[in-house]
Amino acid sequence: MIAFDGVTYDYERVSALRDVTLSLDRATTTALIGPSGCGKSTLVKVAVGLLLPTRGRVRIGEQALDPAHLTSLRHRIGYVIQSGGLFPHLTARQNVTLCARHLRRPGTWISERFQMLADLVRLSGDLLDRYPGQISGGQRQRVSVMRALMLDPDVLLLDEPLGALDPMVRHDLQQDLRALFDRLQKTVVLVTHDLSEAAFFSDRIVLMREGRIVQQGTYADLRHAPADAFVRAFLAAQQPLAPRHE
């Protein structure tokens, strides 16, 4: 459904991505994980067309993600970032429906789609007519997911969507998001620093380092057959600390 063919992305003096080749199937969830600066967020930005590869290409289905087709292909991609990225001067409802209204989708379609998504993410009532600053962080992320799904995209990209939430809110949203992914059967790419979160959500984990893919597979693959010393060290660093007193 989405494929990266030899993708390299260079900043002025640094290669953020180095010859990344990766193919993600329809109706699967893939977690991108690795230390800060490894290239996982850059890969998502390339996938959504915010950055264009220095070399290589990205395909959505059979269509190359290039400047000539960028706008139409972006309508097939939902994108959620850590902060939510909601417009503060628009209500939750206006944020969610903005693109559909811009594209002049029928009012009845917009209303029905909006209500279906509100039910999916468990938001209701006057909360949806409040501004982002008037709702909680977890609620803002649910609105952001609604906005990303409004045009019924083929691909859903989430760049550390739960990183800024407190543990209890994060736990509830993790449960709801996994149920949502299972129900919608879309191609999902999730960026996270948390290996347990990656294992909870994904069919496949892609571990990155310095712009390259070091290993990919299931959590069991990484745990029982680490590719090298870096993978072993990364797994060890993800283990919980021992309590000071039992």
Image (cartoon, grey):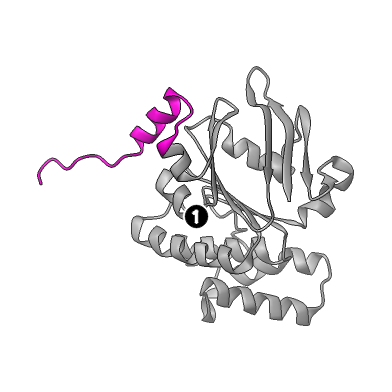
> What residue is at 53 percent from the left and 29 percent from the top?
37
Quarter holding residue 193: top left
Q: Is residue 31 above or below residue 168?
A: above
Amino acid type, mark 1? Phe
The residue sitting at the left extreme is: 245
- The residue at the point 73 percent across, 30 percent down is 6
Whether 79 is drawn above or below 128: the answer is: above
Which residue position is annotated with label 1? 201
Residue shown at 44% from the left, 64% from the top: 175
Residue 163 can be seen in this image: no
Q: Position of residue 198 (x, y in %)?
A: 47, 48
Viewed as shown, does residue 7 lie left or right of 38?
Answer: right
Residue shown at 48% from the left, 28% from the top? 227
Q: Give the left or right position of residue 118, taking residue 11 as reference.
A: left
208 w.r.t. 116: above or below: above
For residue 22, side relative to residue 230 (left or right): right
In this picture, which residue range is highlighted in magenta?
224-246
